[in-house]
Amino acid sequence: MNRTPFFSIIVPVYNTEQYLKRCLDSIVNQTFKDIEIIIVNDHSPKNCDEIVSQYKDERIIYIKHEINKGLLLARKTGNIKASGEYIIYIDSDDEVNINMCEYVYKECQKKNYDVIHFNTKAILDDNINISAKDKERLKMKAEWYVSSSRSLIDERYLLYEVIEEKIPHNMWGKAYKTSIIKKITEYIPDIKLMNAEDMLQSLMIYYFSESYCTISNQLYYYYIGIGESNKNTSNLNYNSYNYLCECSSIACKEFFNFLEKQGTEILYGTYYYKIYYNQYRFLKEKIVDNENKKEFEKILETHFDTNIINKYLKLKEYENIKLNRYKQIIDKLIPYFFSIIMFEYYINIKIFGIKINLKSKKSFKEPIVISFNSLLKNIFSINTDNKKDKYIKILFIKIKLK
């Protein structure tokens, strides 16, 4: 391919051939045609060659690894080969809406964004043996975590936003400016990682990113419970858990090394340890119900320094003391028996001392406070101070005065 495509779509493949055709069909049939499709066969043991050879599409670039290197390095191989203006990663056991590239391209025409984040539809494998209610809960939880709509993002502080997990770490479901991906590729270590690899690459990307936008449409279809995954805890054993802990610890160290190379390890020190703690907490939650929890905790503590964890928790405790003081003041200012606060995607209701926290599909960019006093003003109030907007309000009906 001699021309420069607009999108480079990178598809790593390892042991997911039974889903690969579904994935590739959704890519080759994109309504926006100016793409290249980079398939990286990460030494998969099945019939990847045979499946890919069925597609007589000149936009496909097929690369094979002689050994299995893992998802991070399979993506790195794709990064090096990519020539498009933007890169999109798609896992080979997932698929995308055929209009995905067209939607993203339209956003790119508005502004040359560094990151474009679109929504995900979660689909559960029929073989998952849980109740319909639990399936729906799992589906909603997955969609909420990777959602492009769950928080209001401040473009000026993108690295902070991803560290605070307002922007999810997953590499798929987003389009990235290729110039940034090329910049971070030199910092991606030649190490096989099977956990926290998305986090590591994501943090590097947002370190250099200065603009971000979201698309509310569900353009990525994420299949839960299939393919190669480190999220399944049902078959967790000492060796697999040790490997997860080792990979997470390496990912944390590699991000610190990256900060050192930028000369900003001291500047971002506190935020680095927040990431360190979050990985520790994530791994500890995996074994919370395990009958051999104590033995697994010993493994975890060989990879993570509990002294650092405890010092970070003490710092967090101090910050929470300050936040709780502010919260107590705010609670006293708002009438005790009735108030509603709407901000971002959260609705907090207080009725006669009972607190109810809800999530909303609509985002409120500025806080909206409804209290007993504001209700009284809507039942009856007169405003004659503003010459341009004089009115009488009776039972929520506003009557303008001349």
Image (cartoon, rainbow, N blue to C red):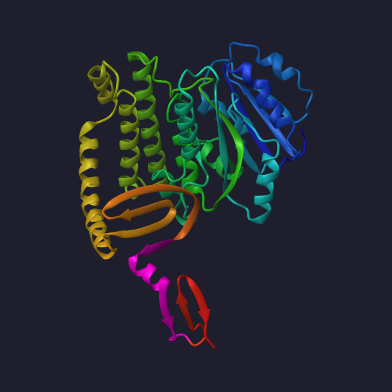
- Tell me: residue 52, above or below residue 196: above
The answer to whether residue 380 is magenta is yes
In this orientation, does residue 83 appear? no
Residue 307 relative to residue 124: left or right:
left
Residue stretch rendered in magenta on the structure: 367-386
Q: Is residue 153 above or below residue 291?
A: below
Image coordinates of residue 183 in percent, x first then y, are 54, 42
Q: Position of residue 29 (x, y in %)?
A: 75, 32
Does 202 lie within the magenta span?
Answer: no
Residue 129: image x %, image y %?
Answer: 47, 17
Would you place residue 95 above or below residue 360 in this image?
above
- Quarter of the rendering containing residue 50: top right
Residue that lies at the very extreme toward the front in this rendered image:
395
| Nearer the observer, 141 or 107 | 141
**Image vertical order of residue 383 relative to residue 140, above or below:** below
**365 or 58, nearer to the observer:** 365
Q: Quadrant of residue 104?
A: top right
The residue drawn where x is 45% and y is 71% is 395
